[in-house]
Image (tube, grey):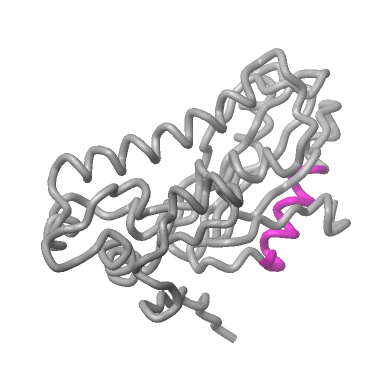
Amino acid sequence: MNMQPTKTKFSHSSWASSEKPREKLLEKGVASLSDIELLAIFLRTGVKGKPVLNLAAELLQRFDGIRGLLDADFESLSKVNGIGLAKFVQLKAALELTTRYLEKGFERGDAISDPGATKRYLKSKLRAYHREVFACMYLDNQHRLIQYEELFFGTIDGASVHPREVVKRVLEHNAAAVIFAHNHPSGLAEPSQADQRITDRLKSALSLVDVRVLDHMIIGDIEVLSFAERGLL
């Protein structure tokens, strides 16, 4: 059965135009803010006849949420009154800052010990792809990151993964352990039978060279599924 991810709906009636997101952030913390309120703080001002909260809501509605907004090109964004080149550049810079912030947590020297941080890092790397991509995090014997690498690129519904090539790259990096990851462009993070089969094949192949597979993560729109947490390794 083909299932489509549920699209986020943004309602103008769910908040009052008199709300002050900056004050709410200071009083209740950043996690208390909705996507609309966070974007309104970023935009700072609206346009004539359209307060900033309304502009933020319009953008999220038009581009199906934060992901669609950050993935949008300048031509698409510029069709919205109030969004010009300056705000487009700011949005792209904000996205890159987020990616670099997450990468800093995986510089060599720090052992990978936080599954949540690993999920956020891999999500920032793979979620935006509209085709399936298979990646590997090479780790040393202390589980410190040696390198992240995207190995195989496929279509919207699959990518061919070659265990021989994976073993070759693992040995070239002198890795002692690995974490695999791939995205599901459908947005659903549930593993398929093919996902389970290739994970088993890779685990068996790497065991012959004494390399551990610590996890295989599937990146969806919202969730990240961990094979290790599911007991699938």
Is 201 a magenta residue? yes
Q: Is residue 172 visible in the rendered structure shown here?
A: no
Give the total number of marks visible in the rendering: 0
Is 168 placed above or below 116 here?
above
Quadrant of the snapshot with the N terminus: bottom right
Residue 70's x, y, as percent? 34, 51
The residue drawn where x is 57% and y is 23% is: 104
Q: Which residues are magenta?
A: 190-203
Q: Answer with the quarter of the image where residue 62 lies.
A: bottom left
> Is residue 219 rendered to the left or right of residue 6?
right
Identified at 66% across, 45% down, the residue is: 119
Furthest residue in direction bottom, as rendered: 1
Q: What residue do we see at 68% from left, 50% from top?
A: 217
**What percent of the width, then of the height, locates residue 4?**
50, 79
173 with respect to 159 (left or right): right
| Residue pictured at 79% horizontal, 51% vertical | 200
- Residue closest to the far top: 109
Is there any visible trace of residue 78 in the rendered image? yes
* Residue 157 is covered by the magenta coloring: no
Q: Which residue is nearer to you in this view: 157 or 32?
A: 32
Residue 63 % position (x, y):
31, 66
Nearest the camera: 97 or 201?
97
Q: Of helix, strand and loop, which mostly describes the magenta segment?
A: helix
Near-viewer residue (56 or 212): 56
Question: In the rendered view, would you say 156 is above or below 86?
Answer: below
**Which corner quadrant of the image does residue 52 belong to?**
bottom left
Q: Position of residue 169 (x, y in %)?
A: 61, 26
